[in-house]
Structures are given as structure tokens and as C-alpha cells.
Image: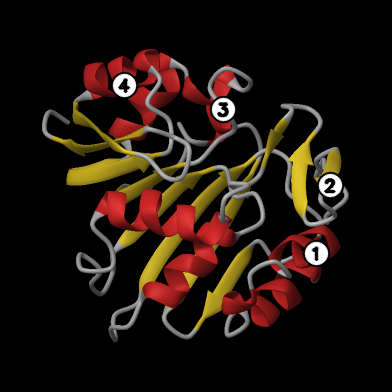
Amino acid sequence: MTPTEQPPDLDWRDQAIPVSRRFDDPYFSLAGGLEETRHVFLTGNRLPERLRDGFRIAELGFGTGLNLLATLLAHRGDGHLFFTSFEAFPMPAGDIARALAAFPETAPFAPAFLDQWASGARRLRFPKLTAEIIVGDARETLPGWTGRADAWFLDGFSPAKNPELWSDDLMAEVARHTAPGGTFATYTAAGHVRRALADAGFTVTRTAGFGRKRHMSVGILTNG
């Protein structure tokens, strides 16, 4: 952690699942975090089939880095990807390592990730992917970002518990930072979130969720 970073306040469920005290919400599905990531964010954005050299993924809510690791595992092509994540409360490397221990499948990339993270690096380099984690309130940091994503992972805590990360203004910024024809996927099907994304220019579809979550949302930018 760098001196200016504010870590999250955590509890641990079953000694393995980090839960934010600030938002009273777990960092990943109790039914299987890696499987949820694949269902919601990869399949929801039609990945990995869309991946190509220069493809850009952006994310609200870095958390344990599980979505980044799932992307690395899914990328089988030769092209180089770019991954940008916005995180207000970055988790210390020791807590991330504790959480990732539940997912031995991430072992091909987790050590390199954790070594870089523990050193204080927030630009992470892998053979076929470069990641940048932008620390701070996304309402302040996203408007100044100069990038445009081909796919968004909207993975903040529950809209009922973390409404700031799902506001109309922030969803408009997501759309403004999406390439033409770009997509988003999120585990939530909350009506106000879907309406905000639709108003921002996405064609929004409610689809089958993961585990006990009946529905989730996906969309494509058609009016941006």
C-alpha cells in the first residue's frame, strides 16, 4: 500500500471470503467467485471471442483482482490487452492472497500479480496484458481518464449499499468512456441502474444471472 491509499475495512466469512464492513457486502459470490466472474463479466461481454490486439477492458471495483486474473486465464490469443480498473479502497496484498487462496486455478498468474501489488505498483505488467489500477473515488477519477473501453466490468458493491458507484452521472461517464459498439456487463439487474445505462446510450438487456441471482444486465453502446 502507498501512504495515500485507504485500505478497506474487512471481515472474513468462513475464513475465506472478504466482506466489506463499509458496504456490508462480500467481494465475490458465496456460490463461487471465479465462476461468477466468467458468467457475468466474460460471457456477458462475449469474451474471450472478442479479444484482439489492443482490446481495452475497464472496470469499476478492482477488489481482489479476481476479474483481472480471470481475464488473463481466458486470453489465449497473441494480442496484447489493456485493463483499467477504478478502486477507491485498494486491498493490501496479504488480504488479496488470503482471498485468492480459494481459487487455485489462478495460480499461473496470482504470484506475479501479488508480487507487483505488494511492491506498490499500480501499473501491472504481464506477458500479454497491461493493467492500470486507478486509486480514488471513481466519481472523481473516471471523468479525467483519457481511455475508452471496448468492454466494461461494472462490479461495484450492491447498488442498494454503494449507490454512489451506480449513479446516473457515473453511468453517463461509463458511456462517455466506451468505444463505439462497446459493451458492459454487471451482476445487478436493478431497475434504476438499467435505466441510467439506457439513458446514457446503451441498449440494455436483462439476462440470466449467476447462482441465486435470477437476473443480471448486459448492454451495447448504440448511441454514444
Q: Which residue is mark 3?
A: 158
Q: Residues within 10 Å of mark 4 (few under 14, many from 20)?
A: many
Q: Which residue is mark 4?
A: 194
Residue at the image point whose x is 57% and y is 77% from the top = 105
Task: Give the spatial CA distance, label 3 vs label 1.
Answer: 23 Å
Would residue 83 be visible to someone looking at this image?
yes
Task: Answer with mark 3 or mark 1, whichever residue precedes in sequence.
Answer: 1
Residue at the image point whose x is 75% and y is 77% from the top = 115
Q: Please state which amino acid type lies under the numbered disc 1.
A: Arg
Task: Answer with mark 2 or mark 1, whichever residue precedes in sequence.
Answer: 2
Q: Is residue 26 left or right of residue 173?
A: right
Task: Answer with mark 1 or mark 4, whichever residue precedes in sequence.
Answer: 1
Observer-nearest residue: 87 or 21? 21
Element type at mark 4: helix
Q: Is residue 16 left or right of residue 62?
A: right
Q: Which residue is mark 1?
A: 98
Q: Please state which amino acid type lies under the numbered disc 3.
A: Ser
Q: Is residue 112 above or below residue 167?
A: below
Q: Residues within 10 Å of mark 1 (few under 14, many from 20)?
A: some
Q: Kindly identify which numbered label has been placed on residue 12.
A: 2
Q: Is residue 223 above or below residue 113?
A: above
